[in-house]
Amino acid sequence: MNKFVVALSAVASGRSSWLLIGLTGMAFTMGASAMWAFIGYVIAEFFMFLLAAPRLRRQTETNNDLTIPDYFESRHNDNSHLLRILSVIIIIVFMTAYVSAQFVGGGKAFSASFGVSQTTGVLITALIVLLYTMLGGFMAVSLTDVIQAIFMIFALCAVPVIAIYDFGGIESTISAIQNVDITLIDPFALSAGALIGFAGIGLGSPGNPHILVRYMSIDDPDKLKFSAYIGTFWNILMGISAIIIGLIGRASFGSVEMLPAGDAENLFPYLAQQHLHPILFGVVIASILAAVMSTADSMLLVCASAAIRDVYQKIVNPKREVTEKELVFYSRIIILILVNAALIFGFIASDLVFWLVLFAWGGLGAAFGPPLLLSLFWKRTSRNGVAAGFITGMVTVIIWNQVPILKSFVYELIPAFFLSFLFTIIFSLFSKPKRYEVVKDLN
């Protein structure tokens, strides 16, 4: 794909309903200090584009890798398929939770906008995503991500501009926010632990396959520098706009009890409904659905390829030539199963979209991030080290998330990421890599 498509596709698939539903709701509750939740990933993704992405692109082209499990197996010539199997397990577990969060986000948007129950909204969202994903493959999804990104950018910028105009200008808007609570405009009005936790969100960027495969798909790795600047610009613009929407919403409604269902994550569609012409309001709803679809479809395709290509084609039936028609048919069955699993998870999960996404983001980031970075930049990384990093990151995120005292201390991704990094190094040092694992040129 070309550099512009890669940039916007990575931005759209990476942000999801977390940005439009979760972050705006968090800014409503916390004020300007919620900005640290997007600063971390903006910085991390900029350096991923510049430093790690070109190496990943060249390595995967050399070895003809199409997926992240492909990359880990070929990088370490893992004939046992251990890394591929572990990768698939991690992808399916955490991406199911991630897709579930998108369904919940879409459900909230439909509920706040049209008065239907959240359950009905979740079902409508799941049906739309299911049909949409069934109709296209990776290229189609990536190209439509660009259109969806444009919808998201327009909606995030239009709503605050019109709302500020209705308030009587920037000064009047700031005054209204200060009248509610002056600390809302203070970006440092949070504890050190919360600040570290929010900034640490960026650690998930190196480990999320739906973003990594965008880097792998660019037609020329030298063009990733351009993609870095384009993607970072839109990341910053959308993040700032989401924070401003949260602040304006707080000035408009005062307390969360004034929002539909008393839920801060219903702010964005509800605020848009109050200030926009019905046609523009329809665009806002389309932007939320675009955010949901651009992430959910990417993840469903990654999960489907993990199950069909990485398990069925590479492990279960490696000697048989599987036709393109069969691959598409089996992938659609897997997508149908995963959508139903995500629906069930969404109905039983009690977390807000903001935190449900962060759990899945953290699990993928901690499990894949450190082994990926080390395998790209440290020649001594071994298969056993990567496997140890996978397991450590995944287990730490799950356990930390389920222990209240640990979860309240710091975001689970941070300790999980550094433990995964540490265990990858330790097991690599204690298990001398075989000759074929030592890569001579990682450039």
Image (tube, rainbow, N blue to C red):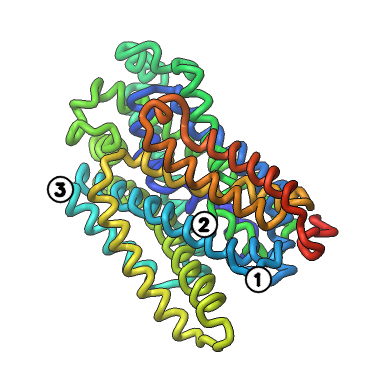
For image coordinates 31% across by 11% down, the residue present is 179
- Does residue 220 lie above or below 207 as drawn? below
82 left or right of 357? right
Which residue in the structure is indicated by mark 2? 210
Disc 3 vs disc 1: which is toward the camera?
1
Amino acid marked by disc 2: His
Q: Quadrant of residue 423?
A: top right
Amino acid marked by disc 1: Asn
Given residues 36 and 94, the one toward you in this image is: 94
198 left or right of 289? right
Q: Label 2 vs label 3: CA separation?
A: 30 Å
Q: Label 3 vs label 1: CA separation?
A: 50 Å
Which residue in the structure is indicated by mark 3? 117
60 left or right of 158? right
* Residue 92 tag number: none
Which residue in the structure is indicated by mark 1? 79
For image coordinates 38% across by 71% down, the residue present is 334
Going by the picture, which residue comes out furthest to the front? 430
Amino acid marked by disc 3: Ser
Q: Secondary structure at mark 1?
A: loop
Q: Label 2 vs label 1: CA separation?
A: 25 Å
- Does residue 330 lie above or below 206 as drawn? below
